[in-house]
Each structure stands twice: as C-alpha cells, then as structure tokens.
Amino acid sequence: MGAVSCMNSGSAAPSWCGEVYPVMKVSSIEPGRLFDALVTGILVIDRNRCLCAINGAAEALLSLSARKLLGQRAERILGGMPLLVAALDKAVRSGQPLTEREMQLPTAVGDTLTVDCMITPLGDGQHPGEVVIELVNVDRMHKIVREESLNAQHDMTSALIRGMAHEVKNPLGGIRGAAQLLERELDSEAHREYTRIIVGEVDRLRKLIDRMLLTDAVAHKVPLNIHEVLEHVRQLIQVEAGGITITRDYDPSLPELLADRDQLIQAFLNVTKNAVQAVHEGGSILLRTRAERQATLNGRRYRLAIRVDIVDNGPGVPTELASSIFYPMVTGRAEGTGLGLSITRSLVHHQGGTIEFNSRPGRTVFSIWLPVGSHDEGA
C-alpha cells in the first residue's frame, strides 16, 4: 500500500494532495509528475480562494506560468470568466460539483479558447475546503478531429496532384521542344516572338508543377534553434515589408528541436509573406513563440511542443475560404497560385507538426506546432 502525494513545485500542497488516502501502488512514477502529465488543466483553489496548485496543462491554457499564478486570488485569475467565478461561488456554497460547458476562456496573449469546466468542492457548504477546477480544452478536441480529417483529404489530394503533375510534365517537354524547333524555321521576328511566349508559358507551368511536387521532399532533420530560423525569416521579410512593423515575442527558455531548417524557413516564409500582403503599409506583424506541454500532433502525444504564432492585424481570412484554405489552388488573391499554405502544411507535417489558424477582422493568427523530442509510446 502507498499514499497519494501531489506536490506542485513552489507551492504548498492542498490537503487532498497530501498523504491522506491509502491506495494500491501501481506505478513507480512520482504522483507530482502524473499530475503535471494530465492533458486536462487542473487548478486547486484553497480555503482562502487563492490558487495553491496548478498543472502544466492549465498553465498552457492560461498562457501563464505557475510562478505568476500561485497565490493569486481565484477572482483575479478567472476574472475574464465571470460565469465561472459565479459557478465557483455556487459550488462552494452548496458543496456540490458543477459542470459548465463551452465557456470562453480569454488567455494572457489575447486569444480566446472554448473550454468545459468541472468544479469539484472538497468540503461542504458548512465546512468549505479546497476546490478543484478542471478545464478541458474543447478547441483542442475539435482541432484533433479537424486535423485527422484534413490529413486524410490532403493525402488523397496529394496523390492526385502527383499523378497529374507527372502526366503533364511529359507533354510540356514535347511542346517546349517543338516550339524551339519551330522558332528556328521562322523568318519573321514577330512570329518568333510567339514561339518565345509558348516556351515561356511552358517553363512557367513546369515551375508551378515543381512547386506542387515540392511537398514530396524528404526532411533532413538536424538540431536547431527555432529563434535562429525565425530571425532569418524576419530579415528576409523585412526587406519587402516596407512600412510594416514586425515585432517579436520569443520565449528564451525554449529548447532546441530536431527539424529540417530549409523546410521550416520555407514554411514560415510562406505564412509571413501572406501576412505582409494582408496588412500592407502601416500594418503590424508579430512573431511569437511559446512552449506547449502534452500536445497531440498528427495523432501522437508529445510531452513538449513549440508553438510559433504569426499574428497580423489585416482584414482576416474570408469566411468562404476558412474551411479550405490549406487545400491546393485555394487563394483569396487574383494573382495568387493557391499553393503557399498547402505547401506550408505539407512541410510542417514533414516535421511531425501541425498548422492551424484563427481569424477575425483586425487579427489573424497562424499557429504552427512543432514537437520537441520523441512522442509518447501508445499515445
């Protein structure tokens, strides 16, 4: 027999986390590590309505560290969720658990998440004790479902494009060769100009097909610093950004990850160029990095992932394109090819990562998650 002990570093453990309940010892893993490994965000509020314990998933949801949150009043932490504060009061008074579905949770970085909240008081209305608040990221669940569906559709589309591209490249070569031979036989400069147009358009089509086939490139992964990659992209973009302000909000504690540097540069470059085209002169773009614990990427669970946000204050993604923006040949610009985001998604997928976006007029966020280390077995 053993005992449950659930201490969160840097804080006093609530009574329910102490050695109170005898249990059958089934694992050699420290209970504190188990607490931090949960995908569900857990906050423990003490008798004085202050936060006394929090796990990594809750830190990620709130985009704030335990160091900043521990000891804060519940009303301050949950101030952006008045309905949850009211539910907390009700649960404490009644001593009964409550559940609130699909509540909007504002985060410290300006985003809003949809969460299900379970509030469990550990005392009763007469003798209140600690309160456990569980936050389940509903958006995360929806994201996983969308990701699986998009992966399946993308695989089918990619197979179709590869087959079509190979079939088209052969006759294009014949057309180009015939046009060059014809040019030699023509005496008129005006007529030769027509053959040069044919050759030029054939070359343009071949380059377009090569870009479509770029997604087949094998990733050559090496240890790298994500900020070095982003700084390289920023310097490239700054040249053509003109009057656009590019700011950075980097987390310096992020570890190195294993990825293909060139493919990452191309992926970030594609998204950032789209942001530049969206905001025009006088706009702003933010490059932001954060750590995300217990991330599920492409159906695999990772203890740690790096999230890169590219934020712009442009008009937003048109509603009619939102559900298909990562598909090939989908674009909101007359001069666009519709390949940039499709290729970006494939390049990110080659790194084991995923890409999502959230958009409204005045704020568009493209988020790229990249895994750090190997995925958990059985996840």
Image (cartoon, rainbow, N blue to C red):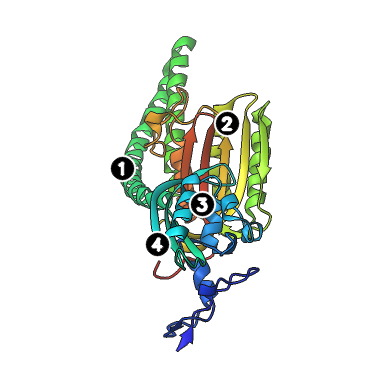
Return the disc, 2 or 1, that comes first in the chain's sequence.
1
Q: Residues within 10 Å of mark 4 (few under 14, many from 20)?
A: some
Quarter of the N terminus within the rendering: bottom left
In the picture of the structure, the residue carrying the numbered disc 4 is 96
Q: Alpha carbon of mark 4 to alpha carbon of mark 2: how far?
A: 44 Å
Asked whether residue 168 appears in the rendered view, the answer is yes
The amino acid type found where label 1 is placed reads: Leu
Badge number at residue 313:
2
User: How many numbered tags mark residues here?
Assistant: 4
Question: Distance from label 2 to label 1 (Cα)?
Answer: 36 Å
In-front residue for pair 295/61:
61
Q: Please report whichever mark, 1 or 4, sits nearer to the chain's N-terminal start.
A: 4
Q: Is disc 4 placed on a helix, strand or loop?
A: loop
Q: Mark 2 or 3 closer to N-term?
A: 2
Identify the residue at horizontal 51%, vertical 60% (top origin): 57
Question: What residue did someone put label 3 on?
Answer: 369
